[in-house]
Image (tube, rainbow, N blue to C red):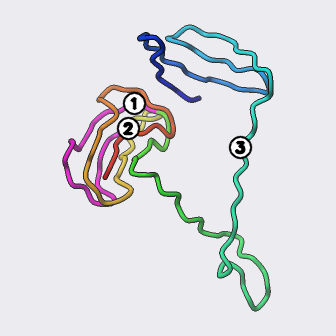
Amino acid sequence: MKQFKYIINGNSYNVTVNKVEDTTAEVEVNGIPYKVFMDKPVKKQVVTVTRPAQAFNTSTGAAPLVTRIASIPSGGAVKSPLPGVILNIHCKIGDTVKKGQKLLVLEAMKMENTIPSDHDGTVAEIKVNTGDSVLEGAELVILK
């Protein structure tokens, strides 16, 4: 499920994409459900992971069962790890934060989850308010 906000000809639209299969998408626009039919099937995203040379055991040539994959830089955005509701915001614009410092509290599945900073920086923008519902991957706080 993904959420988008659009402004078209001065009108605001909140669009939620609930399900996409082949050439059909189930969406909600400002709370009204629609079925959207597309000309071509949606392309599936393919992710290729390459292992660094040191991940292999050079003596046996065998790859380990578990490899550590480096995190992809988030471009300054701290994103929601799961869908939920923002309970508390523990930072404000201009605050200097350290990696691991609590920025927000997110309620998901009736549990409170602390959302920490993923790197050192200064809070440039807070994109959510207390009580907002967010989806997985939604930008919560922008750090510089």
Res 41 → quadrant:
top right
Which amino acid type corresponds to the residue marked 2 in the rendered image?
Answer: Leu
Whole-number angstrom distance, CA of label 3 to CA of label 2: 28 Å
Q: Nearer the viewer, residue 20 or 101?
A: 20
At mark 3, the secondary structure is loop
Percent across and percent down for residue 89 are: 26, 38
Q: Quadrant of residue 37?
A: top right
Q: Are marks 1 and 2 in contact (CB under 8 Å)?
A: yes
Give whichever of discs 3 and 1 has the lower sequence position. 3
Q: Which comes before the other along the chain, label 1 or label 2?
A: 1
Q: Earlier in the sequence, mark 3 or mark 2?
A: 3
Q: How far is disc 1 from disc 2 in space, using C-alphas?
A: 6 Å
Residue 98 covered by magenta stretch: yes
Q: Nearer the viewer, mark 3 or mark 2?
A: 3
The residue carrying mark 1 is 85
Instruction: Identify the residue at image location x=75%, y=36%.
Output: 43
The residue carrying mark 3 is 45
Residue drawn 50% across the image and 25% down it: 4
The part of the chain drawn in magenta is 84-105
